[in-house]
Amino acid sequence: MGFQEEFGQCGHCDGRKDQSRGHKKCFRSMGPKSPRTGTRRSQRFYNYMTLKGLSDPADFEDVESLKKLVQVETPSLFEDLLSSSESLSSLEDFLVITEEEQTNALAMDDFGSTTNDQAWHKPGSAGDQYSKIDRRVRGLISSRTECVLSVLADMEREVRLKIDQGLTLQLDDGMCRMVAHGLAQYYGMKSWSQDSADGTRLTILQPTCATVVASGTLFEYIAKRQNISLCY
């Protein structure tokens, strides 16, 4: 049986039997429509049952009965909190501590529920700022620590002196530019590289609203992390 014999002539395609995109669109519109099930879970269940041929679409016209078939008995977090005296007690203890202590507690709880193995650091600390550096730069630091520290020593000193107004560095070496970008990320600055009129490669570091002077320098943090004596 052909398409037109089964569904009748399509006004859009004007009787043509070609399988154009428009014709397929008309085919979809002429088929049975699924009921408004209210939730994506119910809609997926309806689609699965229909495609598998396990039931007739007319059986799912009652939306309420369809919802009961896929009803989830898991209580919400809020309902679980209200039903447990132990949870309520923990919430009361949480509400009486300072906002900073709440932030730290939530951060530690989030860390404990993730699969990463990175240590949690106090906001604004050297460890916290280091975690904001691009992982490619951190990879460079790990693989070429001595070279990075030799470049970083003078560069970071200059950045800290001009952190409020920003600075422009002339860096011809790609590794040095990566260190500069990592340094900018460590202090919450924005950075980019561009060519000047004479073809010189410039790296610009500018402060932002997120710029912060960390409690320790990046140089000191890397040296301590890699167990290297501060000899630069």
Image (spheres, rainbow, N blue to C red):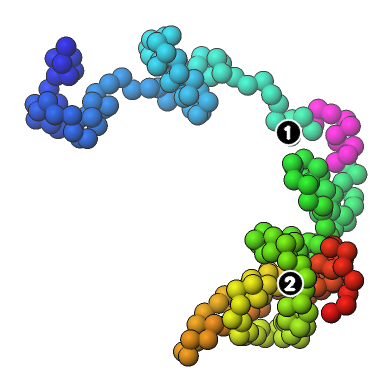
Residue 180: x and y in percent read 66, 75
Give me the C-alpha separation between circle 2 and circle 1: 48 Å
Residue 75: image location, x then y, percent: 71, 26
Q: Amino acid at mark 1?
A: Leu
- Going by the picture, which residue comes out furthest to the left? 15
The span picked out in magenta is 82-91
Q: Main secondary structure of the magenta part?
A: helix
Which sits in the foreground, 169 or 80?
Answer: 169
Q: Is residue 40 above or below residue 129?
A: above
Vertical order, 141 against 63 (above or below) = below
Amino acid under disc 2: Val
Quarter placement of the N terminus: top left
Mark 2 lies on a secondary structure that is helix
Residue pointed to by mark 1: 77
| Left/right of residue 39 with respect to residue 118 in the rendered view | left
Q: In the image, is 50 to the left or to the right of 79?
A: left
Labelled disc at residue 148:
2
Query: Quadrant where the C terminus lies?
Result: bottom right
Q: Position of residue 220 (x, y in %)?
A: 84, 71
Q: Quadrant of residue 5?
A: top left
Q: Residue at x 74, y 72 (%)?
A: 147
